[in-house]
Image: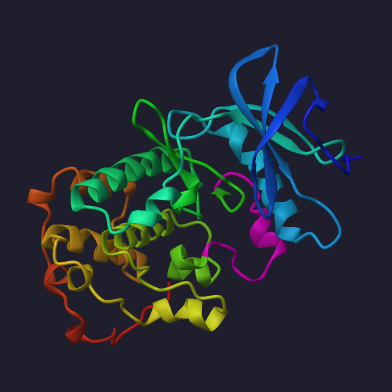
Amino acid sequence: MARTRIDEGDVIDGFSLGKPAHTGGMAKLYEVTHPDHPGPLLMKVPRIGSGTDPATIVGFEMELMILPRISGPHVPRFVARGDFSRQPYIVVERLPGKSLYPLLERLPCSQPEVVEIASKIATALADLHRQKVVHLDIKPSNILFRDTGEAVLVDYGLARHLELPDLMDEEFRLPYGTAPYMAPEQILGVRSDFRSDLFALGVLMYFFSTGRRPFGDPQRMNGLKKRLWWDPPPPRELNPMVSKACQEIILRCLEVDPARRYQSAAQLALDLGDLYNVQLTARAEKTSRDGWRKVVKRC
């Protein structure tokens, strides 16, 4: 049976808990050490009690299944796990840097900075997708960087591994995600499309380029579905320093129909690495005067 309380100084399966590193709504992170596992480590423990959102438990179960199956420089190195029969936890390497979240205080960023960040994220997504995982919660707080520069994608509570049961889909009818970054098809219940992560990256690029979220932060389903038929103002109208090539890339990522987006993260990374050779379309010249979408395809 899982412990009802965990504190600094406790020892769980040989891991000595240090001070809390972060407390969130769904989990708590502790610095931990273990004689058999050198290097800085973090233990993630779900916050379980009366009134706990069932998605917290199901999401943690997804992480328990997914993290041991993925590897490489773009994901946190998995160390150990504990199941719900005794004490649920996940131990991973502790990354030295901060997430992108603190950058929100100084938006908009310069275009070179936006492109550099997005290129690293796209490269990380290409590696994650190669391992058959759709992240489904790409946002600033879930992106960190190694000292060597690689983007690291964290928090797999909403992710989908295409070769594992999708517990989130089996247990819940309403979509789960972070409202500003959710792709149209994700809102409609599709959780298996790699291009959903590219939409979220497009939202991040738009936000970092203009200082505004393209679809706001809706809290109800009707607000979420607005992105199925409404186009945000083109980035260049909000920030003239955004180039036509960069606007082309951002708006292509934000297409409501996944077939009109980039078809892979690798393809997106290629364009971000060579803006001069981006093939411009009507997206590059798009203005708000072009109006709303006239035809909406179901995703």
Residue found farthest to the left: 276
Q: Image quarter for residue 92? A: top right
Image quarter of the C terminus: bottom left
Quarter of the image for residue 38 reads top right
Q: In the image as oriented, which residue stretches furthest toward the right?
A: 1
**Which residue shows up at 22% across the image and 59% down it?**
249
What residue is rendered at 55% in x and 62% in y? Answer: 177
Tag count in the figure?
Answer: 0
From where the camera sits, is residue 253 visible?
yes
Q: Position of residue 136 (x, y in %)?
A: 50, 55
Q: Give the range drawn in magenta.
A: 162-178
Pinpoint residue 271: horizontal percent, then vertical percent: 19, 48
Q: Nearer the viewer, residue 112 or 190?
A: 112
Position of 231 relative to 39 (above/below):
below
How is the structure coloured here? rainbow
Q: Magenta: predominant secondary structure element?
A: loop
Q: Position of residue 144 (x, y in %)?
A: 44, 39
